[in-house]
Structure formats: C-alpha cells, structure tokens
Image (spheres, rainbow, N blue to C red):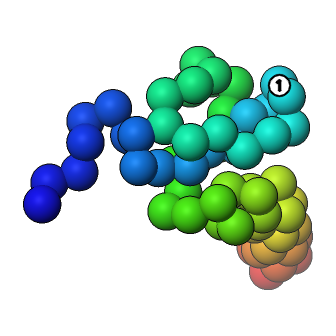
Amino acid sequence: MPEPEDGADKWWYSLKTGKVERGPGSPNKDRLGPYPDRASAEAALTRARERNEQWEEQDREWNDW
C-alpha cells in the first residue's frame, strides 16, 4: 500500500515546542523528521548531537592529516 502524501503516518520532532508530532503539524523549517515511529522522533536531538560530534571529529582528523 502506498504511503500517504501528507506524511500522516510519520513522526516529527518540533524544534519550537520540543514535542513529538504525528502527521502534518509544524512547518518543516521548525521540525526534524520524518521518523518511522514515536521513539525515533523522541530521540531526534540526541541523534543529531551524536552525528554532529562524529562529523566534527572527522573534520579534525581530516585537517590534521
């Protein structure tokens, strides 16, 4: 079955409210996602922080090469 165009079955993390939303909600500029489930959306900031730390470490290694 194809996924709904409006993302009604997806989860998002709102950067403005700090809450998880399902389906259409806050403007895309104010949220992270989409995520397949609530738990993934709730972990959005942690995952973003971890990725940023990894990229910064990779940049340091590249620059020290």
Residue 5, x across and y down, in percent: 25, 36
Residue 33, x across and y down, in percent: 57, 47
**Which residue is identified by label 1?**
16
- Is residue 25 positioned above or below 4 on the image? above
**Of the residues shown, which amino acid type is indicated by label 1?**
Lys
Few, some or many residues within 10 Å of mark 1 (<14, 14–19, 20+):
few
Residue drawn at x 23%, y 51% is: 3
Residue drawn at x 49%, y 28% is: 24
In-front residue for pair 42/65:
42
Residue 4, x across and y down, in percent: 25, 42
In-front residue for pair 11/59:
11
Q: Quadrant of the N terminus?
A: bottom left
Q: Is residue 51 left or right of residue 26?
A: right
The kind of secondary structure element at disc 1 is: loop
- Is residue 52 positioned above or below 58 on the image? above
- The answer to whether residue 59 is visible is no
